[in-house]
Amino acid sequence: METEVAAQSTEQEFVSNPFGTVTNKRVVYFRNKGWFSGGSRQDIPLKHVTSVRLDTSRSVAGGIVLLLIGLGLLAADGGIKVVGIVVVALAVLLLWGSPSVVVNTAGNDLNVAKGFPWLRGEANAFVEALRKQLFHE
């Protein structure tokens, strides 16, 4: 009897990555997390989470403008080529797109966490693990 109660109260972790942690009882999440900001940690019971989604935000117009500027700087002579490389790299990041995980709670609080483009797989793993816990898929 005691082992059944202990087994029911044990928290099981399903995923833990830069976007947060999903267990069978709660979500540990970093609210307002951005590229260069850590956000604030929130512990949300699963019963308070109503939905979760994965968005990808891209800035096509900004990326194209920066790409053209960067290519123009790369064509120039001298040390300005280094600036051109940096501008082209930033343009590629803007065109690639950043994953955003949005967790909605019962109080209609939308908690958004953004990550670098190469973290899209980890964002997807977090969203899928949370969906499985919410909808027992």
Image: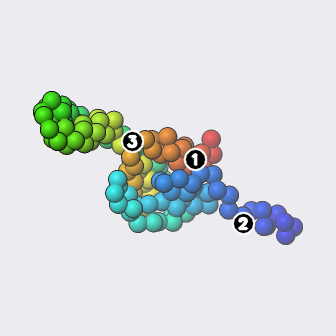
Image point (79%, 67%), residue name: 5
- Mark 2 or mark 3, whichever is nearer to me: 3
Q: Residue 64, how many percent across, how many down?
A: 20, 32
Q: Answer with the quarter of the image where residue 12 lies.
A: bottom right
Q: Residue 22, how many percent across, how many down?
A: 57, 55
* In the displayed structure image, the side of residue 63 where residue 100 appears, left or right: right
Which label sits on residue 9?
2
User: Looking at the image, which residue sits at the far bottom?
Assistant: 2
Nearest to N terminus: mark 3 or mark 1: 3
Q: Answer with the quarter of the image where residue 84 lies.
A: top left
Which label sits on residue 129?
1
Query: Quick check: marks 2 and 1 in contact, CB under 8 Å?
Result: no
- CA distance for labels 2 and 1: 20 Å
Image point (15%, 29%), residue name: 75
Q: Is residue 81 visible?
A: yes
- CA distance for labels 2 and 3: 37 Å
Query: Viewer-proximal residue, 86 or 30?
Result: 86
Give the amino acid type for the residue marked by disc 3 in the picture. Answer: Pro
Residue tagged 3: 117
Secondary element at tag 3: helix
Give the amino acid type for the residue marked by disc 2 in the picture. Answer: Ser
* In the displayed structure image, the side of residue 74 where residue 53 appears, left or right: right
Render colour scheme = rainbow
